[in-house]
Amino acid sequence: MAEKFEMVAKTFQGLEGVLAKELIDLGAENVQEVRRGVSFYGDKKMLYMANFFCRTALRVLKPIYTFEAESADEVYEKVKAFDWDEYLDDRKTFAIDATVFSDVFRHSQFLQYRVKDAIADRFMEKIGKRPSVRLTNPDLYINIHVADRQCTISLDSSGESLHKRGYRVAQTAAPINEVLAAGMLLMAEWNGQSDFIDPMCGSGTILVEAAMIAKGIAPGLYRKNFAFQTWKDYDPEMFDEIFQDDSREKEFDYTIYGSDILRSSIEIAEKNVTNAGLASYVKLTCIPFQELKIPETDAMIMFNPPYGERIGAGDDLPTLYAEIGKKLKEDCVGKNAWIITVPNEVTSQIRLSPSFKVELKNGNIDCEFRKYEMFSGRREDYVRDGKERRSREREEKREERRDDRREENEFFNPMRRKYVDEDGKDLKETDRHAYLRRRHEEQAEREERAKRWAEKKEFDRKLDERKKRFERNNDEDGDDRRGGFRRDRDDNFEGKRDFRRGGRDDRRGERRDDRRGGFRRDRDDDNFEGKRDFRRGGRDDRRGERRDFRKGSRDEDRSPRMHKSKEERFKGTKGNFRNDRRNNDDLDD
């Protein structure tokens, strides 16, 4: 198995995530984003592939020695003590590059000299000869990176920066960097799915990078050499296999349109496009952006307008951005426009709100890469439709994942067999079955814990209720919980209703009024002897007058029949009324 080691791919600020995805797609391991770079692990083949296929990498470093130092002299001693025989000999040439972020080491060039002296002095003391220093095209590029007191010596496997693809033969005044252009395209998820438009193409860098991505052409295809090709352990057969591999290339059935207001820029773009072998996919036109006819077909728009920093339109720059916004709103409905520009008052004249933006560096200029989604109608409706569309897409992806899991389970079901010995004891299960069983047991254990916890909470709740009910029933100072009157604790209590006793004799032994009809105390007769008044139901009305239990009316409101005597009212009835009268004297009015 090939030896694996750590590597670091450098890139521009803001493109770390894009580069990390590229390396993962290539098969790199332990990929981690760092400041302006990505660290990863791989073998020698991965080193070659990272240089050849990564569009957003500036260079790929291989760390070989890490130490701490407090001064340049200490760096000299530790570099001199390192065994350089594995990488250098007296017939080879080398160059030193230093990157310093430290308060201890303030002069990167002086640090370069000390590292160079340490390597040369080691060879002179050992064999009396030393390798030579060559600033251009050396055999070995050595990089020293200092962060505070941490020093890392690395071998640069790329040599010249990887943004120098090899297809550019001419350029305009301020061309965009190839790595930055490729990073913008990958960030915009361009993969050749539609037409492409760059209305301010300049030297054609964005056009060429877009065509290379659409065709699947490796960015290292046009380079003459890489620094790792001069290393002692270089494997030419392995690199030739990578170089000849065209499995990533694909067909492109759309058109890439480029235009510019300057004829000289169009001529330079034509040379670069032709040198890259992509003239059949790129159509160039010299025309101002305001007069450009945008095709009605689906297309992605991306361009790099002037900022007024290195080149620009002078006093007309605000007008230019206002016309850009007007053109996009009128002629680009239904398309996405990506613009890299400087965030200031001038560029705000575009009068559009970006749906996405990220900070990038174009040279030494702080820029923003913005996405403008052009739509018709109100923005609120467009945003709502976009949310609904993304929700549907997420649901479709979840359904696909469920289908994949279902198919996986159906595939592994026949594998869930147990192998037994002669005694019938289990010996082994398939790895898949063991994993599924363990996961099922863990899930069952979680469910059992949740069930026990729910039962405990329910028991505690019922126990609390019982305690509270018990305290209420035994609280002599509290009100009766069944509602109604209660006996005051005042000694002057005079017969108020005691609900705890259900309306029976009060605590002074006095009788309550019976509310159901029957025995009652006559309020007007102190000689009441407890006889029952059936007609009146045991009640007086609110004015103290007698009520008829059948009608509920007062005496004066009774019907004429009710004013007749009992003999008249009961005349002709069966039974011995007189005997009843003698036995019930109190029935007389």
Image: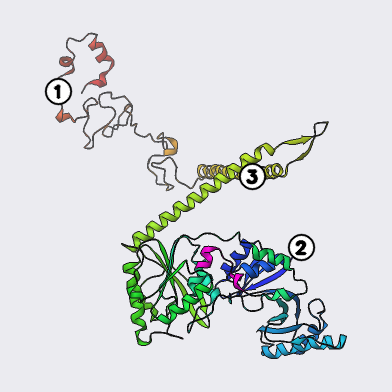
Look at the image and say whether residue 585 sits in the magenta stretch.
Answer: no
Q: Is residue 77 visible?
A: yes
- Judge from the rendering whether residue 161 lies leftward or rightward of residue 122; answer left or right: left
| Secondary structure category for the residue under label 1 | helix
Q: Which residue is mark 3?
A: 443
Upstream in the sequence, badge 3 or badge 2?
A: 2
* Residue situated in front as seen by the camera: 154 or 181: 181
| Secondary structure category for the residue under label 2 | loop
* Residue situated in front as seen by the camera: 45 or 72: 45
Q: Which callout, 3 or 2, points to the residue nearer the camera?
A: 2
Q: Type of residue at label 3?
A: Gln
Local crowd at mark 1 within 10 Å, few (<14), some, or many (≥20)?
Answer: few
How far apart, in angstroms, are the residues tagged by discs 1 and 3? 87 Å
Residue 286 image position (x, y, % from top left): 38, 76
- Marker disc for residue 218: none
Q: Which residues are magenta?
A: 211-225
The image quarter containing residue 405 is: top right
Upstream in the sequence, badge 1 or badge 3?
A: 3
Q: Which callout, 2 or 1, points to the residue nearer the camera?
A: 2
Q: Is residue 30 visible?
A: no
Residue 326 image position (x, y, % from top left): 32, 73
On screen, 272 above or below 513? below
Local crowd at mark 2 within 10 Å, few (<14), some, or many (≥20)?
Answer: few
Q: Which residue is mark 2?
A: 2
The residue located at (38%, 87%) in the rendering is 314
What secondary structure predominates along the stretch shown in magenta?
helix
Look at the image and say whether residue 213 sits in the magenta stretch.
Answer: yes
- Marker disc for residue 563: 1
Q: Type of residue at label 2?
A: Ala
Upstream in the sequence, badge 2 or badge 1?
A: 2
